[in-house]
Image: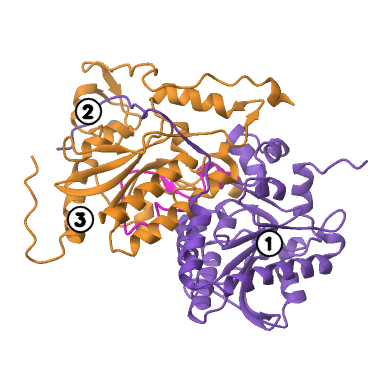
């Protein structure tokens, strides 16, 4: 009998260098595709690719994180960690999708948002927050598929969607396992423990009712048959898009509101909390 | 397997907390910034701002003095957290951590919310309690902001969020992360009726709060010297392998970089908020004047 894959095994598969990336999905699924560049404010961030294409005769906006396959490309694409200009390029495409009534497909594959002085100076937190706010109100269907790793707000910045799909061996977490271990235990080498403790696998997210659909992968992972995985994912994505296209906008927006509004683990107590101390006097 | 042997901590009952050791008025308090000693009473009278200008962190209860006296009514005070991941690690046990924090603060989680007024103008408010696991944003935190924003929408009043948080509550995993869209969805709805969300950033505001509601408010006010950022200094220093300048991510730095609207000293905060609110809630020229602030 085969040993089931551990959470950490899945993290490794989700990061496999030959795992299909956003541009592989574009190549296999799109009959037509143009990549758009830049946020019209500062720069073009290669960690996010965004463009307009056609899948099954349907024009769509496609936005995804893009990692590289070698050091040079990874440097250029910052290992799939977007800077504010990357998120603002995505934002531009969200508005574009709304203006032209195009559904949006987001492909998630990032260890997290870029943590650097320049990104902080240009408002990394704000860039992510604004995207979340815009997706919340987007008047066109939006579907996401986690194709590799979904790390933190860096993933969520293109991940507030009507349907969330995940590949079988992909992961999604509040912070990448290394970052989680560093925050929790000040020791990033405990990443495998964090991966297990924090329930980050696609199956965990399905159990928590956050993810709608899991897409099966070939034995050992998507890299063993990229094109078949992509086609299978493409069918599921377009099924979701077609279902959502049939909804009136008000219903679409109400359902999106409800989808996120109910998330959380809380209980109601018989009595109120009781605080301590005294208010200061600002009067 | 270890979950089987895990002993669930005794449930917390409000009132059970160890009473706040009331600092005697004649006790000296040392400023962490300049090192000067001030009488506790004098410090409180000066809103915990040192003579050097350093703004010491306030508890959620201390912040309630910002509102018109007796105007604050807590809402959703009965929501408490669960341990959805059954989070146990060799170093850390979420259920125990929650109970310890509950005993320490008397709160179920890192947030007090409700309705209040400032210079007679009603509003919904949320206040973080940093002493509760670093003011981290978990399910209860998200739910309380969402409900406050929904109440503001129903009551057609502004929303004020008073924030000090290290970021998402790691122990609730992706459920904590999903509080970001949950909260922003409710804020988007509030925006449709033209009622403002004012975000007050106090030291510190990091990660999840910045990447969701705190940085997309209609008006963003920061306290002097508050540290504000998405990634923490330690993470950035490890990434770039060099020390960051001292003022990096300070409120003043963030204003210079266009991320916040104004830096307001605590002593001016109440009048600033009162005057600002009036601009949005009394938009016609013949609006009656504000009641005198005494
Ligand atoms: Zn001082």
* Pointers 1 and 3 within a single chain: no
Q: Nearer the viewer, residue A212 or A198?
A: A212
Specify the quarter for ligand 1. Answer: top left
**Quadrant in which the C terminus of chain B appears:** top left
Label 2 chain ID: B
Specify the chain shown as orange.
Answer: B
> For residue A150, which quarter of the picture?
bottom right
In the rendering, which numbered label is found on residue A249?
A: none
Q: Are marks 2 and 1 in contact (CB under 8 Å)?
A: no
Residue B107 place in picture, x, y as percent: 39, 29
Residue A266 place in picture, x, y as percent: 49, 38
**Placement of A154 over or under A186, stated as above or below:** below
Mark 3 Cα-neighbour bin, 10 Å: few <14, some 14–19, many ≥20: few
Specify whether residue B45 is in view: yes
Q: Is residue A195 found left or right of A218 in the rendered image?
A: left
Label 1 chain ID: A
**Placement of B282 over or under A99, stated as above or below:** above
Q: Is residue A268 found left or right of B152 in the rendered image?
A: right
Q: Is residue B294 found left or right of A106 in the rendered image?
A: left
């Amino acid at each position: 009998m085969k040993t089931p894959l551990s959470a950490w095994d899945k993290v490794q598969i989700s990061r496999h260098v030959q795992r299909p990336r956003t541009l592989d999905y574009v190549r296999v699924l799109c009959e037509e595709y143009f990549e758009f560049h830049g946020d019209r404010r500062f720069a073009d961030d290669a960690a996010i690719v965004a463009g307009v294409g056609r899948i099954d005769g349907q024009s769509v906006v496609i936005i995804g994180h893009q990692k590289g396959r070698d050091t040079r490309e990874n440097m250029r694409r910052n290992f799939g960690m977007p800077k504010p200009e990357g998120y603002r390029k995505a934002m531009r495409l969200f508005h574009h999708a709304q203006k032209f009534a195009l559904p949006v497909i987001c492909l998630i594959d990032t260890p997290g948002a870029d943590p650097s002085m320049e990104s902080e100076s240009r408002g990394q937190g704000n860039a992510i927050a604004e995207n979340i706010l815009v997706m919340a109100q987007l008047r066109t269907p939006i579907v996401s598929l986690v194709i590799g790793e979904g790390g933190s707000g860096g993933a969520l910045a293109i991940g507030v969607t009507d349907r969330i799909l995940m590949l079988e061996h992909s992961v999604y977490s509040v912070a990448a396992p290394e970052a989680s271990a560093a925050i929790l235990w000040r020791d990033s080498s405990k990443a495998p423990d964090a991966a297990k403790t924090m329930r980050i696998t696609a199956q965990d997210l399905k159990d928590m009712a956050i993810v709608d659909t899991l897409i099966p992968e070939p034995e050992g992972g998507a890299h063993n048959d990229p094109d078949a995985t992509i086609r299978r994912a493409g069918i599921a994505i377009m099924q979701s898009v077609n279902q959502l296209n049939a909804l009136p906008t008000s219903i679409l927006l109400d359902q999106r509101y409800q989808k996120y509004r109910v998330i959380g683990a809380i209980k109601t107590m018989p009595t109120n909390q009781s605080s301590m101390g005294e208010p200061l006097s600002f009067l | 397997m270890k979950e089987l042997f895990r002993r669930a901590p005794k449930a917390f009952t409000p009132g059970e907390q160890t009473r706040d050791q009331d600092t005697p008025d004649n006790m000296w308090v040392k400023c962490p910034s300049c090192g000067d000693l001030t009488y506790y009473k004098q410090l409180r009278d000066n809103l915990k701002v040192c003579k050097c200008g350093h703004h010491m962190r306030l508890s959620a209860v201390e912040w309630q003095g910002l509102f018109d006296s007796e105007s604050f009514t807590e809402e959703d005070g009965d929501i408490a957290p669960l341990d959805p991941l059954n989070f146990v690690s060799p170093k850390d046990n979420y259920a125990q951590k929650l109970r310890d924090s509950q005993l320490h603060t008397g709160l179920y989680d890192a947030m007090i919310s409700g309705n209040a007024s400032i210079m007679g103008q009603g509003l919904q408010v949320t206040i973080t309690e940093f002493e509760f696991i670093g003011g981290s944003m978990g399910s209860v935190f998200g739910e309380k902001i969402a409900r406050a924003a929904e109440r503001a929408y129903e009551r057609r009043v502004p929303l004020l969020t008073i924030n000090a948080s290290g970021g998402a509550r790691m122990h609730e995993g992706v459920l904590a992360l999903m509080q970001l869209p949950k909260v922003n969805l409710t804020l988007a709805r509030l925006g449709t009726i033209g009622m403002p969300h004012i975000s007050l950033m106090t030291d510190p505001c990091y990660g999840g709060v910045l990447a969701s509601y705190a940085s997309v408010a209609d008006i963003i006010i920061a306290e002097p010297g508050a540290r504000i950022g998405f990634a923490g200094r330690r993470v950035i220093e490890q990434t770039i392998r060099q020390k960051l300048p001292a003022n990096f991510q300070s409120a003043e730095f963030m204003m210079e970089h266009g991320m916040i609207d104004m830096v307001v000293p605590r002593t001016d905060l109440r009048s600033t908020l009162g005057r600002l609110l009036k601009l949005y809630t009394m938009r016609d020229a013949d609006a009656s004047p504000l009641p005198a602030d005494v």
